[in-house]
Image: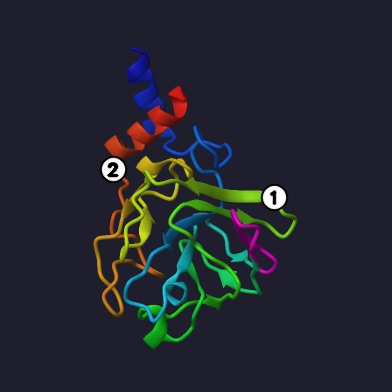
Amino acid sequence: MILLSILLIAQITPFVPGGSGEGTLSSGIVVINEFMAHPLASYTETDGEWVELYNRSGDWVNLSGWILSNALGQEVTMSTYLLPPDGYYVLCACGEESMNGGLVPDYVYSNFTINDTGRLTLRSPSREIIDEIIYTSSWPVTAGHSCERINPGWISSTSSTWDESTITFGNGDFGTPGSLNSVYENSFAQNSWAFIKAFVQ
């Protein structure tokens, strides 16, 4: 009976407010949606590292002053960019397609590293945490594959929300920079299971 009640709640409200940490579904208007930590098709590994943000709200979001940081204390402060609803924003270490694996980024950063394990934190200009992922060796971070979020409304910092990309782009690595993730799921069963996991933790 309890399980049935949870399923009914999940059907009515698949995404619930809460932080982006373990045990809650994502409430961030913009989320970290995909990242490439170990490229193979780029000139150097650093050249081919990138992060994709996704606007899951119904409003345009100005990314001016937004901050992306990692576990090393490195930060990227974004410039003015109006991100539309359901829009994607790709940040990359290199803007040259011939060197970065064959993608066209929206923003090119410097002095920022995406390791195979670590942390990525997205903050507003006031430094409020909007989304955060802490990824370990148990996550689907595979050489030559980006790590894609299965659904932008699911728990941010748990490995079951993520999977390796199944579609190639550019020079041969797997990933979907700037477009719908290859592993995207939005079925009732999947949303219900995500809700249950958040509910019981």
- From mark 1 to mark 2, how far is it between C-alphas? 31 Å
Crowd rating for badge 2 (residues with CA inside 10 Å; few <14, some 14–19, many 20+): few
Quadrant placement of the N terminus? top left
Reading the image, the residue beneath label 1 is 128
Q: Is residue 69 magenta?
A: yes
Residue sitting at x 32%, y 62%: 143
Residue that numbered label 2 is attached to = 187
Q: Which residues are magenta?
A: 64-75
Residue 126 vertical placement versus 79 (above, below): above
- The secondary element bearing badge 2 is classed as loop
Residue 128 appears left or right of 154? right
Three-letter amino acid code at the position of disc 2:
Ser
Residue 183 image offset from top left, x and y in percent = 29, 54
Extreme-top residue of the structure: 1
Query: Is residue 194 placed above or below 68 in the rendered structure?
Result: above
Asked whether 16 or 49 is in front, the reply is: 49
